[in-house]
Amino acid sequence: MAGMFFTKVGAYLFYLAMVVYLYGDLSIYSTAVPKSLRDVACTFVNESHPLNMTDKDPCWPSSPNLSRANAYRIFVVVFAFTLGPFTFFNVQKTKYLQVVTSLTRWLAILMMIILAVIWIAQGRNEGHPKVAQLNAFPNIFGTAVYAFMCHHSLPGVVTPIKRKNRIHGLVFGDFGSVLILYLVLALTGVFLFKEPKDLYTLNFFDISDPTQVPPIFVRYFLALFPVFTLSSTFPIVGITLRNNIRTLFEMILHREMPWKVEKIVLPLITLLPPITIALLTDQVQFLVGVTGSYAGVAIMYIIPAMMVFCSRKHVAKVIPLAVTVRLPYRSPFHHVFWIYLTNIWAVAAVTIITVNHIIYRK
């Protein structure tokens, strides 16, 4: 579709945004999985701050020279050598893998919401969130863009609808229910925990109150939840990134990639940057904020808006009568005003986020 409706420069920018976004995706996966494994595997507890372990603390009591930071890097390397080779091949027939991953996500979300509601009802909540905190806007905006992932979900929602007269209600109902689910998950978390961890599932693993510890299966299932889901998605995202890099290079060079480049060099280009970023930082919240705030904005706001704008111009040129006909199931946001508003909001949000980063230097 990018090649059909965009100019050559527009197609370049489209693939560039996709590449940057997918690099952010892989960086988050390469950080979240080893961090979860590190927090589950490390057994040393610092009595002075048992819930706020530092990177300098030992990982195991029997190995005082092996810090948690170095243990994390070891898990990053193991993760890279375990799942990295998949980027050199193609993955097909992922239907059952997607079903299992979806069921695992639903189970984890329900577990976290139910536990949080029960503990809050029992008066165990420690969180006292501020009404507003403007310097947190970059993280909340980037996380919100990254979490909703409309660019992934919308085709799967719209395509199966046979009775188009119900399309408005189904689409709004779908994303409305997602919004409610996210609000329940987020609000119960901020009111329950005093300082929630950036990997929310780990809040249910590191608990000091022995009366509040969930059953051992629930505890380890939630702590290892990112390992299950993100590890199964990593090869698919990696192959998608590799193919987008190949397409971008072929568009620029006007020729196909040699076999050695496609099978060896491109997978390495795909794999090395996110692994390097993961070795340098374990701040998942920062990576999610940056990925969502910049590449995510382009993918979720600017590109869809411009694609709608260009496709309408193309249709008006090819089928002039289509412009004058009132379609029965057209979107309530069909006016060009919404395209301009979407782009204005995207530019304003990125500007505010960038200024915020400069002012607070984070």
Image: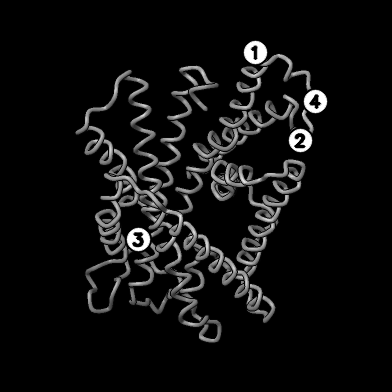
Residue furthest front in the image: 162
First in sequence: mark 3 vs mark 2: 3
The residue type indicated by label 3 comes to: Pro
Seen in the image, is 5 located left or right of residue 59? Answer: right
The residue type indicated by label 2 comes to: Tyr
State the residue position of label 3. 34
Q: Position of residue 359 (x, y in %)?
A: 53, 39
Q: Position of residue 120 (x, y in %)?
A: 66, 75
Question: How far is mark 3 from mark 1, CA to CA?
Answer: 52 Å
Q: Nearer the viewer, residue 196 or 31?
A: 31
Q: Which mark is residue 317?
A: 1
The residue type indicated by label 1 comes to: Lys
Disc 1: CA contacts within 10 A as few (<14), some (14-19) or many (>=20): few
Q: Are marks 2 and 1 in contact (CB under 8 Å)?
A: no
Question: How far is mark 2 from mark 1, CA to CA?
Answer: 22 Å
In this picture, is 168 found above or below 220? Answer: above
State the residue position of label 4. 326
Question: How far is mark 4 from mark 2, CA to CA?
Answer: 9 Å
Residue 145: quadrant of the picture: top right
In this picture, is 98 found above or below 246? Answer: below
From the image, state whether disc 3 or disc 1 is nearer to you: 1
Which residue is painted at 19% across and 33% down in the image?
Answer: 260
State the residue position of label 2. 329
Q: Position of residue 65 (x, y in %)?
A: 22, 69
